[in-house]
Image: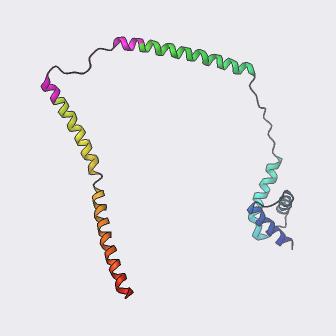
Amino acid sequence: MVLNNIEELLEKYDNGETSLKEEQLLKNYFAGDNVAPHLEMYKPMFGYFLVNKQEQFNKDINFETETTVTKRNFNYKWLSVAAVAVLMIGFYFGSSLSSDDLGTYEDPELALMEVTKSLEMISHSFNKGVATVSYLDEMEKGKATLGYLNEIDNATSLIFKN
């Protein structure tokens, strides 16, 4: 009777339906020496729970006080001010060093050659992308074949209905 009761409690335990008293009964049973051989696999698990229950956390936890928090905010404020100053100096010197060259060509033939070269490069990339989508044509052919199969199916259904 005790073994059947333990097996029922284990089934309830696996389903998460045991109470604390029932779990304590299981822990006491598996802490003993007379555990059934087919239930030996549960013994290390419940043994771990007993050992784990005795462990205690003994390290000190240092909480930050208000002075350390305000000191950090103070440093971050000055850091942000310095970052803004560096960015402003960079924008000022960056804009004054840039030239007014917009990449325009004085010679119309040279400009035509550059535009032609750019358009060829774009066309080549576009054609390469279109070539990878060519399998869609094969899919359309397959869909048309399925239409023929549908007609055959209609014909066979008419034949077998008669």
Which corner quadrant holds the N terminus?
A: bottom right
Whether residue 121 sits left or right of residue 83 in the image: it is left
Residue at image coords 29%, 51% = 132
Q: Nearer the viewer, residue 71 or 39?
A: 71
Q: Nearer the viewer, residue 40 or 124?
A: 124
Which corner quadrant holds the C terminus?
A: bottom left
Provide the residue span drawn in magenta. Answer: 92-112
Above or below residue 61? Residue 131 is below
The x, y position of residue 63, in whole percent, is 76, 28
The x, y position of residue 17, in whole percent, is 78, 61
Residue 105: within the magenta?
yes
Above or below residue 88? Residue 148 is below
Residue at image coords 79%, 56% = 47
Q: In which image quadrant can residue 103 be found?
A: top left
Q: Nearer the viewer, residue 27 or 140?
A: 140
The x, y position of residue 84, in whole percent, is 51, 15
Residue 45: within the magenta?
no
Whether residue 144 sits left or right of residue 106 in the image: it is right
The x, y position of residue 126, in whole percent, is 26, 43
Above or below residue 42? Residue 48 is above
Residue at image coords 37%, 82% = 157
Q: In which image quadrant can residue 151 be found?
A: bottom left
